[in-house]
Every structure is written in C-alpha cells, then in structure tokens.
Amino acid sequence: MTIQFNEETFRDDYTFKNSDWAIQRFPFPFHEDSYMYSVNMEQHRGGPEGSIYEKRFDVDEHYVAEMRDRAMVLADDPLRCQSLPHMTLAGWDLLELIMVSKSEDYPDLFELHRDGDQWRWVNKPLGIDDTFTFLDETTLPYGPMEYITRQAQGDFCVLDQRDDNLWMDAGTVTTQADWSLDFDIGMNFFEWHAPVPLAHEKGIFVRALKFLLNIQQGSPARRLNWTMTVNPLLDTSPENYHKWGIQKTTITPDNIGQKQHLRVELQTFFRLPRSNALVFPIRCYLCNFDDMMTMPKWGRRLHRVIRDLPEELATYKGFIDNRPMMLDYLAKFDDGLPTSPGIWPDKDSEPPLQA
Amino acid sequence: MSKFEFPQSIRSRPVWGTLEPRAGKHHLMIADAQGAEAILDVATPELMTGAHIIFIAKGTDYGDKLRALNPAQYYEGPSYEAAASRIQRVLQDAKMSTQVYLSGTESLMGQAMRECTNAGIPYTAVQTEHRGSTARRMQCVHCKGITEDVAIDPFVCSHCGLNLFVRDHYSRRLAAYQGVCIDAEDPGNVPPSKGIYE
C-alpha cells in the first residue's frame, strides 16, 4: 500500500499527528492576508499531484483512525447518522459514487467488482470484503448511506432538492464544527445556516444556493471553510459541548503551538444520478500551529488573518477568548514581508522568516 | 390581550401570522389558552358550519365562547399531549380542501404544525397566529430532552439538569428551540436568568 496509516487517536490522549507529507498537503484555507465570507466555489476536477484536491475523495494517513473514531461516536450516539424515509435511494447513489471513485482513484486500496446488481466491495485498509445486491438494503449490515460513510473520511450531508431549495434530509455527521444533524435534519438551506453571522446580509447564501441548485452530474464543485479547535478533537459536536468546551481553557503560551489546531473543511458537492439529491461531503483536516509555522508563508498570513478578523466571526468560530494568546504566538512568525497569492505554501520561493 | 411583537431574528425562527378566513368546506382550528381569541376574531357563521375546533384551555375560560360559535365539531382537552391522537386522527381523514388554523403558544402551533406536515400538508399552507404566553418549548441539545414553557434564559434542563441558554435556532421537526450548555467553558459561572425577551 502506498499510504502508511497512522495509529492515533482523536480523543483522550490525542496521539493524532501529521507527517511532513500531511503538513505539506494541508489545505491552508487563506488565499490572501485577510478573510471574509465569499462564495468561494470552484470545479472539483482534480488538482496538483499529491494535493488533497487530486482525488474525488481524498484518502490520507488518518483514514483508519478516523473511521475508528466515527464508529465510537456512532456507538455512543446513533442519532449522528440519520436518513429521512425518502432519502434511501440517495443513499444508494452515494454508495455507488464513493465505491466507484475510490476503486478507480485508489486501486491498490479499494476494489469494486460489479456483475449486474451483484456487487463485491473490497476495502483493504479496513479489512472489509462484502458482497451485496445493489438497491437491496437487506443485503448490507447498515443502510447504504451509513454503510459507505462508515468507510469514508469526513461528514456527509445528503440534500434533497425541491421547491427551489436544498433540504438537509440525511447525513452522517461525527466530525462537525459544532452543529447538530439531529437538530438540523429536515431544514432547508437558509434554516440550517441561520445561526451564521454576517453571511446572510452579504447575500452569500442566496448566491451559494443558486450555484448549488445547478450543479450537474459529473461536474462536482468544492470550497474550503475553516475554524479553530483546541486539541485534535474530531467530534466537536454540540451534543458533547458540555464535555469538550472546557478544553478551550487549557491553552497556555507554552502549549498553544501543539494544542491549537486550524480546522479546515474541504467541502465538495456532487449531484447524485437517480435521486437528483446533492451530496455535500465535509472533510475535516487538522493542523497544529507549530506544524503550520514550518511554512513561512502560512506563518505570516495566519497572523494577519486572525489579527484582522471581525469580532463576530471570531466569536462565531468560538475562539474570541483565545485570540489574544494566538496573536502573541503568531506575531513571532510574521516579519512583515509580503506573501504570494494563493493557498499553496510556495516553500521554494517564499523567503524564510527574517529574524 | 394585545399581540406580542417578536423581535427580528434568524432565518430558522418561525414567523407567525394573523388568521384570516379562507375559502373551503372544512376548517380545522387548533388553539390553546389565549389562542381562543384569534379563533373568536376570525370566526364567521359560514366558516363555523365546516369547523372543527380543538381547544386546550390551560386554565382559561374561553370554552363557553368557543362553543357558542356553534362549530360543527368542538373538543376541549386538558393538554396538547391528550389531544394529539385526536389531531392525528382528524388529519388522517382531512379532505383536500381542509384549511388549518393554529393559534396560541409557539409550543402548540409548532407541535400541531408538525402533525400537519406529517399528514402531508405543507407548512406554508397552514395559517398561524401567536397569542398568549411567549414561553418556549426547548430541546436540550445534550440529552435531547424537551422542556416545555421555558420563559427565562438561561434555564435548567428538566431532564439532565445542565444550565442551558436559549437559542433562536428552531427545528420544525422537533417543534422546539435549541438549548445549549452556558457554562461548559467555565463550569458554575451561570449569569442570573431573565425573561427571554427582556
């Protein structure tokens, strides 16, 4: 196998770590030295070799550990995976999309053998070899959406399209930035985004919805979103906020470089063929400040972005209290030099940090 | 009683209207407490010939006035829970032309609205009018328990005992607002409760 899967945890002792490879391909989300909401959509048709954009569903060194973490979350709280009754067909669509994509993009890790509706799925990293009848739920151990999303990194929201709107009618959500599928299931696009500040007034959601309603089969789209998380905790759910919220107060000037993580979501959007639903995978990448600072450009830029971020956004993203400590840390990595445009680290062309 | 003007809020928060008579042979009217006043305001003899009024008195004495409207069917129940199976049964047989009117507390309207959508009536086709208490039906996002009649913020979850703050984020499926732990990052530091709209 080409990928060495990490033995690591996203809870308790937090042994999660990024290899140099993972740091270099981390999706740093800021293409310039400031940040404001925008409809930052682009085609999801590959990207630079080795980048997280290259494959339809990126698989990395955290795959096996993330799937183990998901299984634990679902065992604790089955409500994190729900599908309203009309969404089963969309679940099959999603299963097909992921199986076909992964077996084509990672033939050394995944195999799909199809003979009519008799399908055999081999997932080598997770040790799965299942044969089932496509569109027959009784031949799988879970519903189709749950079955395949237990084998795919990132959260998955499956959106029904009707009445010129998108409806959050199914999903598997265990690595979320503090929102509840159980509460939001059944809501339309504007309703589930209701708590987001500023973006409604800027017309972001009206334009984003218009774009998403028109996504066609075979033409997926993508964007990046971000927030901050203390400790590499995947399950920052509102359900468990009374347990993990306290961790935000454990940051000190000594440990912030290791504990404070930039949490980036690669959001992609695929039209599903039979159901005409839209699947919205939200893949979470974590990188701590110390690792990020190994890229001089990212050090300079992150300081400027966090410093100048409007207060509403720092509050909404949950790090307003820790912002001063973040800035004390980040300022040391900002020598005032200009940065190159775009998100890539440009390690060969960006000057090292000036003393 | 004058109507309460809810402050502008986020997009998931329901917006209540004012009941108006609509054309139709069948009129299902569900109200609690002061919600009776909205029915008294909208009622016409013509409407009443096809009306089924379901009223949850909650200690008020509007019953006689509602009965005096001479609706085709009248039911008065002690609680929403007690009336729920009746509402489901009525909706099961509701004809295409049935108009639905909901009035009273947000809890009553939210739960009855949910029954309507479960029965296949789009929520946009259901008329509503808020009257009476502004207390909310709250779901604790942590234990999932529902606490009824929450008038203060923060409040204590009646199931798990966590201190919760009252969000405007609302789920039609749960017919409830969301309550989230207020002292997760500083246990025990709970500000004094005040009225939700104070």
Image: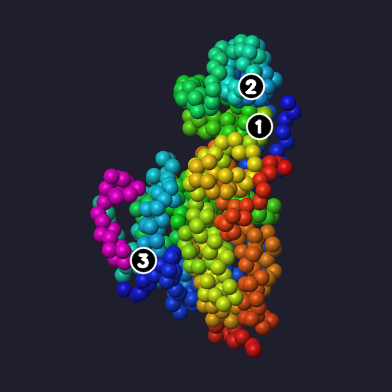
For the record, the magenta segment spans A121-143
The answer for which chain carries disc 2 is B
Q: Which residue is mark 3?
A: A64
Amino acid on which disc 2 is placed: Thr
Q: Which residue is mark 1?
A: B133
SS at circle 3: helix
Residue drawn at point x = 60 percent, y = 75 percent: A253
Q: Quadrant of residue B151?
A: top right
Residue drawn at point x = 60 percent, y = 52 percent: B182
Residue drawn at point x = 54 percent, y = 66 percent: A230
Q: Which residue is mark 2?
A: B60
Q: Per the image, is A191 magenta?
A: no
The x and y percentages for residue A259 are 52, 71
- Choose between A323 and B99: the one closer to the eye: A323
Amino acid on which disc 1 is placed: Ser
- Outermost residue to the bottom: A355
Q: CA distance from mark 3 to mark 1?
A: 52 Å
Residue drawn at point x = 64 percent, y = 89 percent: A355
Determine if residue A32 is in view. Answer: no
Mark sitting on residue A337: none
Where A81 falls versus A266 (above or below)? above
The x and y percentages for residue A269 are 49, 56
Amino acid on which disc 3 is placed: Val
- Choose between A152 and B185: the one closer to the eye: B185
Determine if residue A234 is in view. Answer: yes
- Choose between A217 and A30: the one closer to the eye: A30
Callout 1 environment at 10 Å: few (<14), some (14 to 19), or many (20+)? Answer: some
Where B12 falls versus A176 (above or below)? above
The x and y percentages for residue A131 are 25, 54
The N terminus of chain A, quarter of image: bottom left
